[in-house]
Image: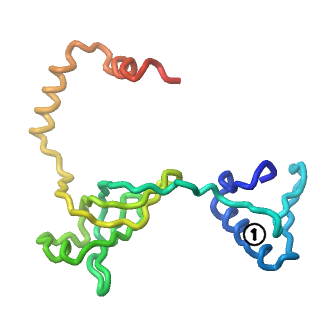
Amino acid sequence: MLNGELLDGIDGKRKEVMERWQKAARQLRLLTYRISAPFLARPVLISVDTDYRGDDANQWVQVERYIRGEIQDLGGITKANAHIRLPDGSTLKVVTEKDLLREDKVNRLYKTAMLRIKAEYNVLTRELRNARLLEFMEYANQVNEADLERLTRRGAICWKDVSDPSAWVDELRGGDIE
């Protein structure tokens, strides 16, 4: 903070506090916050003259994604949506059209499903927001042993002349990356 006015190197909670102090200092023009510590070259001041902020420019991009999760809730009285519990434990709310839910013949409630969505994706935090359900995808988490064995045999035939597959892939990628 002594080197510039960007808050990107600060954790989320401290950033919120700084933004709150900045807002208070702008409203009560005589208010100044001072942060000092023995290891700081000089104190950090937050006043009406400072402009601490996050560099949020262009971090949200439009994406189309496939997500997998357990359907926790489907429907809605005024706006149709689905609440999906993702593998990391978080919940994503996905808006949809009523017709898409009405025409779906599969009971997906409290079951794992694969969905194709369109959303805004934060390239820094990897969050999704403003998600819209495009379609449910057929998803089977069962492995077909016969297909897996067939693909393994096929791969073994294709790779039989390669003595070290890892080295071969590394070379394709441009050599050793360290």
Identify the image's colour scheme: rainbow, by chain, secondary structure or one colour.
rainbow
Residue reaching furthest to the bottom: 77
Type of residue at label 1? Answer: Gln
Q: Is residue 146 left or right of residue 155?
A: left
Residue 119, position as x, y percentages in the image: 38, 61
Residue 92, position as x, y percentages in the image: 39, 67
Q: Residue at x 47, y 54 (%)?
A: 126
Q: What residue is pinned by disc 1?
A: 22
Q: Is residue 38 left or right of residue 80?
A: right
Vertical comparison of 84 with 38: above or below: below
The residue nearer to you, when weighing 40 against 51, is 51
User: Residue 103 is drawn in which quadrant?
Assistant: bottom left
Q: Residue at x 21, y 63 (%)?
A: 136
User: Residue 165 is drawn in which quadrant?
Assistant: top left
The residue nearer to you, when weighing 107 against 77, is 77
Vertical comparison of 172 with 67: above or below: above
Q: Residue at x 34, y 69 (%)?
A: 94
Q: Is residue 44 left or right of residue 133?
A: right
Q: Residue at x 84, y 76 (%)?
A: 29
Q: Secondary structure under badge 1?
A: helix
Residue 100, position as x, y percentages in the image: 19, 72
Number of marks present in the image shown: 1
Residue 114, position as x, y percentages in the image: 25, 59
Graded by Cα atoms within 10 Å as few (under 14), some (14 to 19) or many (20 or more), the crowding at tag 1 reads many
User: Residue 84 is drawn in which quadrant?
Assistant: bottom left
